[in-house]
Image (tube, grey):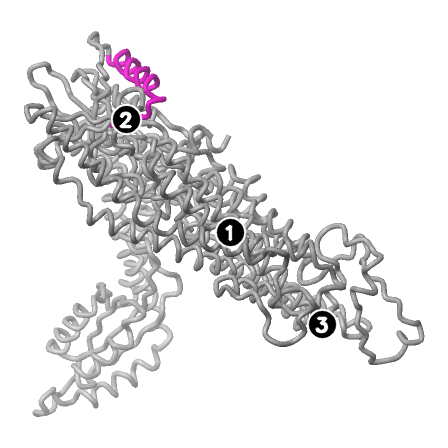
Amino acid sequence: MGTIFRSEEMSLCQLFLQSEAAYACVSELGELGLMQFKDLNHGVNAFQRKFVNEVRRCEEMERKLRYIEKEIKKEKLKIPDYGENPKAPAPKEMVDLEATYEKIEGELREVNTNAEALKRNFLELTELREVLIKTQNFFSAHRHEMGSLVHDAQQALSQDEVGFAPQQSVQLGFLAGCIPREKLPAFERMLWFACRGNVFLRYEEIQQPMEDPVTGDPVFKSVFIIFFQGEQLKARVKKICEGFKAALYPCPDSPQEREEMLKGVSTRLEDLKMVLNQTQDHRHRVLVGAQKEIRTWIIKVEKIKAIYHTLNMFNFDVSHNSLIAEGWCPVRALEDVQMALKQGEKTSGSTIPTIIHPMKTRETPPTFFRTNKFTKGFQNIVDAYGIASYREVNPAPYAIITFPFLFAVMFGDAGHGSIMFMFGLWMIISEKKLLAQKSDNEIWNTFFGGRYIITLMGLFSTYTGVIYNDAFSKSFNIFGSAWRPHYEESLLEVPDIELTLDPALFFRNSTPYPLGIDPIWQLSDNKITFLNSFKMKTAVILGISQMLFGIILGIFNHIHFRSVLNILVEFIPEVIFLLSLFGYLVSLVYFKWITFDVSQASCAPALLIQYINMFMFKYTADGGDQKCNPQLPFYTGQQTVQTILLVAALACVPVMLLVKPFVLRSRHNKKLRMRGRLGAHSTDALIPNEIIGENPSTSQAGDSVPASVSQKDISVNTEGTTTSLLPDDDFEDDFEFGEIFIHQVIHTIEFCLGCISHTASYLRLWALSLAHAQLSEVLWQMVFSLGLSMDIPWFGSVIVFVLWMFWANLTIAVLLVMEGLSAFLHTLRLHWVEFQSKFYVGDGYSFNPFSFKFVLDIESLEDIK
């Protein structure tokens, strides 16, 4: 797991790269993925940088590859993914790649242009053939009706459009063509209104769909024939056809001419179909050849572009013909970086070595944790709250256990936990196959990314379900109940009688149930009362234990940063405050469990009343039985112990509130006096950490960083140690006593009140566990148990099966998905707020190295081995 408990030590390095070797060196660093470069040209326009032309060439190649990829997908060819990861090609190979892509693109565009023209011609000929066939069929089928149609037309068109003198003879003309089927109703209405009903429209649908020559989508059309009289109506009909984009085709008047024209069109269609097939075969061959290489080409171009983008971040030294780069690198990886640079020099053939020089800096280094496929999910949960400060304790390794365990306390059900565990285990076993599918479903990718978290949550839920003796709201009597009734058999046979199992009588001589809760509680009427008390106290114990663990983790931060002051005035008072008040509450819970048995249950002191009386200094009972009163003390000397604990807790508050600000002010004044003695001739005053008493590499203002040491005043050498460089000019302005005092007040109030509110917040462990158990029980009783209670000979099995399907779907949708998500979010809150607030600052920034894996967004091969 590397340095997952604390972020790796980082070093700011300066690289001097020769121009001929810079490309190969950056390529090797991209494959390594352990160098985060700084932009040394942040003030330079993007179009004025040195390698802007190369970036444009890469963008042009990307455009051509996108076009080729689009054509491959349009051909419904699947791009194979063999997991290849070719290295970035040399700059001289860019010319060959550009020529290859240009050749394929030009060939495809030429083929597509020709194919589009041929398809358009084919469409027109197909429509013309349909027009000729439909027209011929129309005239043949309505030959006898045409005489009456002409007679009616002569009567209707015996006058001109404006109603002048009648004509002696009428000559009817017609136009034929094709129109999209969805436009036909509007086309008919427009003809009627525009021509005032003086035209006759006949149409028939074309059964087979046409293919659009541009998009390839199917288009449904109809053939129409329009009869009219006169040139004016003919011109008007043509304009309407143009407006509706209806295609008009020449159609001879005589049947013999139409028959000859149809034969000619059919012959041309056959020839055109053969040419189209040949064109399509040629296009398919070109795309199949590109299909095998397209993924490799895309990776190469992306790497080339990423390299030149990175080179644009470097400074160019004209005098030495070299590039100067700066970047963060883990100290442990310096040797790997040097090896990568040497490999780049060897690849480029450069004889001048690349120089890597560790620098001293005042900048805060980035935070870097080495993770694997198991720890990555838990680290993402922590990073979602905030990136850890540099060299701060990382909560992720502890969350590997605490996160699924607290989830399981709320979700405790052996049945539901087993289903969740098997689902997560299936994703882990099938991860190679599922990764190869490269799904773009965001919800599925979220589940798959947290497969190890889901598996652990299911496993821990199964364990807590066994402890609760709860599986799908039912209990398992594996070892036999420890309760033994001793009523007379005749009394047990009395119908509708309610009997009580007194634990003082029926449990005294028996051994407890070996594992978990006794199954007899599943049948008891006071099950909720018992489980409420048990789960509520367990939640308080777990909550206070985790908060105490968080405070203890804080001391590792103080020790690492050599902050003795924080140990004395923060860590120790916080531990005393928490243990004096809430640790004592936990001890009372255990004391009551151990001391009072079932025979003394009625006289057992009430924890809540006793705890309230502790703050009220009340140790006498008012009225009632003085020998058996819940207000009476637990043990002898309880008043003295509680008074001491309460006074100790209250005494810690001013220590946390006042000591640190005044100590820091005293140290600041001491530094001022030292500066006065040293003289003002020194530019910078080097103040060792032993004098400061704090390490400035953490940004926990008010906790471990004095105002006199800002976040920028950090120097990291090659060994990973830190020194504080304080400029004289800013020395007096950095310290603000009022700001530090206010921050310390906020920190003290937040901690003291947080101990109370966070303890109450952990009661959600009890509340959600109870809600999940009750919801599961209600779902069982109201759905599945109805079918089991029906006494129907053969049809009952069908009812049980139907109800089981309904119950199973609700179980998965409500109890597993919705309840699981709810418990997950509550667990997330308990870790982010209640646990991490005790020691975690989380105001760092992530280490984002230049890595081809991130550029290409591909899964690491090491993660799936």
Instruction: Tell me if mark 2 has few (under 14), some (14-19) or many (20+) residues whose alpha carbon lies within 10 angstroms of its own.
Output: many
Name which quarter of the figure residue 528 lies in: bottom right
Residues at discs 1 and 3 in contact (Cβ within 8 Å): no
Residues at discs 1 and 2 in contact (Cβ within 8 Å): no
Left or right: residue 642 compared with residue 64: right
Residues at discs 3 and 2 in contact (Cβ within 8 Å): no
Q: Please tell me which of labels 1 and 2 falls first in the chain.
A: 1
x and y percent of residue 792 in the render?
80, 75
Q: Which mark is residue 36?
A: none
Mark 3 or 2: the one toward you: 2
Q: Which residues are magenta?
A: 327-348
Q: Please tell me which of labels 1 and 3 falls first in the chain.
A: 3
Asked if residue 117 shows in the view, the reply is: yes
Identified by mark 2, the residue type is Thr
Q: Nearer the viewer, residue 366 or 601?
A: 601
Left or right: residue 504 compared with residue 98: right
Q: Which mark is residue 544?
A: 1
Specify the farthest residue to the top: 351
